[in-house]
């Protein structure tokens, strides 16, 4: 959010304007019209829905249906707060079944369907906030695979298409910060094929770029202008 706010300030526009700029540019090119770069009027910005990591399966599914009905196309589910990672996996399987089973096309593309039953598709992501050890994270992935197989829902898979046959299938687009030790995220991905997203580990400088350059002019005037703004420590980089 700090990066987006910095970009908005540098351009003199609102945060919504930054988020909607690509949509506005596409609309302008199609219509041949030009508008104010600082205006975001008439442009909708999609937002993710968020589900807590507590509550019964039926409660979470009901909340998810409400989010989809409100227009959310992607839903993030908090995991790692229940006693057993398998319980989190069961919730994810139930959500996938409830939101996507009525439309096979939505489960493969992530688009929300207009099913009259109200169970239109949605992209599912998860966020563990570094709650698990590597072994617990792998147990979650295994339970998720088994749950999908038992429910005959393995046709929707977001795992790497180039992954080996030993990797697992998943209904998750990605899981955020699955392990307590950020260095274990690469192993988790290698073992499961489930894409990993980085959040607080990046903020804390534990992985990824050490600096993000917002003002090239200010950087070039600094004492260490010869250093790269996107340099990585090879021992910490996650590919």
Image (cartoon, grey):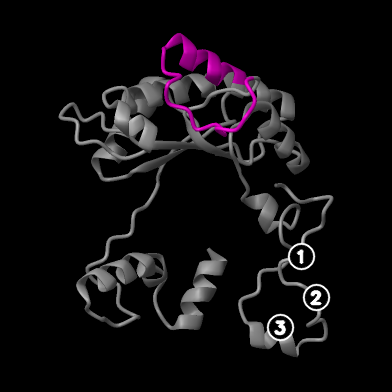
Q: Position of residue 180 (x, y in %)?
A: 72, 37
Residues at marks 1 and 3, CA–CA distance in whole angstroms: 14 Å
Q: Hey, which quadrant is residue 136 in on the image?
A: top right
Horizontal arrangement in the rendering, residue 64 relative to residue 116 (left or right): right
From the image, tell me which residue sits under label 1.
231
Q: Position of residue 111 (x, y in %)?
A: 32, 40
Residues at marks 2 and 3, CA–CA distance in whole angstroms: 9 Å
Label 2 CA crowd tier, 10 Å (few <14, some 14–19, many 20+):
few
Helix, strand or loop under label 2? loop
> Which residue is at the front of the view, 109 or 183?
109
Farthest residue toward the top? Answer: 150
Magenta stretch, main secondary structure, is loop
Label 3 CA crowd tier, 10 Å (few <14, some 14–19, many 20+):
some
Q: Are marks 1 and 2 in contact (CB under 8 Å)?
A: yes
> Which residue is at the front of the view, 156 or 210?
156
Farthest residue toward the front? Answer: 162
Q: Residue at x 46, y 82 (%)?
A: 11
Numbered range of the magenta stretch: 142-165
Horizontal arrangement in the rendering, residue 209 relative to residue 18 (left or right): right
Q: Hey, which quadrant is residue 55 in on the image?
A: top left
Q: Position of residue 4 (x, y in %)?
A: 51, 68
Looking at marks 2 and 3 on the same chain, the residue that comes earlier in the sequence is marked by 3
Looking at marks 1 and 3 on the same chain, the residue that comes earlier in the sequence is marked by 3
From the image, tell me which residue sits under label 2.
227
Would you place residue 152 above or below residue 233 in this image? above
In the rendering, which numbered label is found on residue 219?
3
Farthest residue toward the bottom? Answer: 221
Label 1 CA crowd tier, 10 Å (few <14, some 14–19, many 20+):
few
Horizontal arrangement in the rendering, residue 197 relative to residue 124 (left or right): right
Q: Does the image show residue 84?
A: no
Q: Residue at x 48, y 19 (%)?
A: 90
Residues at marks 1 and 2, CA–CA distance in whole angstroms: 8 Å
């Amino acid at each position: 959010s700090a990066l987006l706010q910095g970009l908005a300030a540098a351009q003199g526009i609102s945060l919504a304007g930054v988020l909607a700029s690509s949509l506005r540019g596409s609309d302008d090119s199609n219509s041949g019209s030009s508008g104010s770069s600082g205006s975001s009027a008439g442009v909708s910005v999609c937002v993710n829905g968020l589900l807590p990591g507590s509550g019964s399966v039926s409660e979470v599914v009901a909340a998810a249906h409400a989010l989809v009905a409100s227009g959310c196309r992607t839903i993030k589910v908090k995991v790692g707060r229940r006693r057993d990672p398998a319980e989190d996996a069961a919730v994810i399987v139930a959500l996938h079944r409830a939101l996507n089973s009525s439309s096979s096309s939505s489960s493969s593309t992530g688009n929300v369907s207009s099913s009259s039953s109200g169970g239109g598709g949605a992209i599912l992501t998860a966020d563990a906030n570094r709650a698990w050890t590597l072994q617990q994270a792998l147990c979650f992935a295994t339970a998720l695979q088994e749950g999908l197989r038992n429910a005959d829902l393995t046709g929707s898979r977001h795992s790497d298409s180039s992954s080996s046959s030993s990797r697992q299938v998943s209904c998750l687009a990605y899981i955020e910060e699955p392990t307590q030790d950020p260095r274990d995220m690469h192993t988790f991905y290698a073992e499961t094929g489930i894409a990993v997203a980085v959040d607080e580990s990046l903020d804390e400088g534990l992985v990824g770029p050490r600096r993000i350059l917002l003002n090239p002019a200010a950087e070039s005037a600094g004492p260490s202008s010869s250093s790269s703004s996107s340099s990585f420590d090879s021992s910490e980089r996650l590919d």
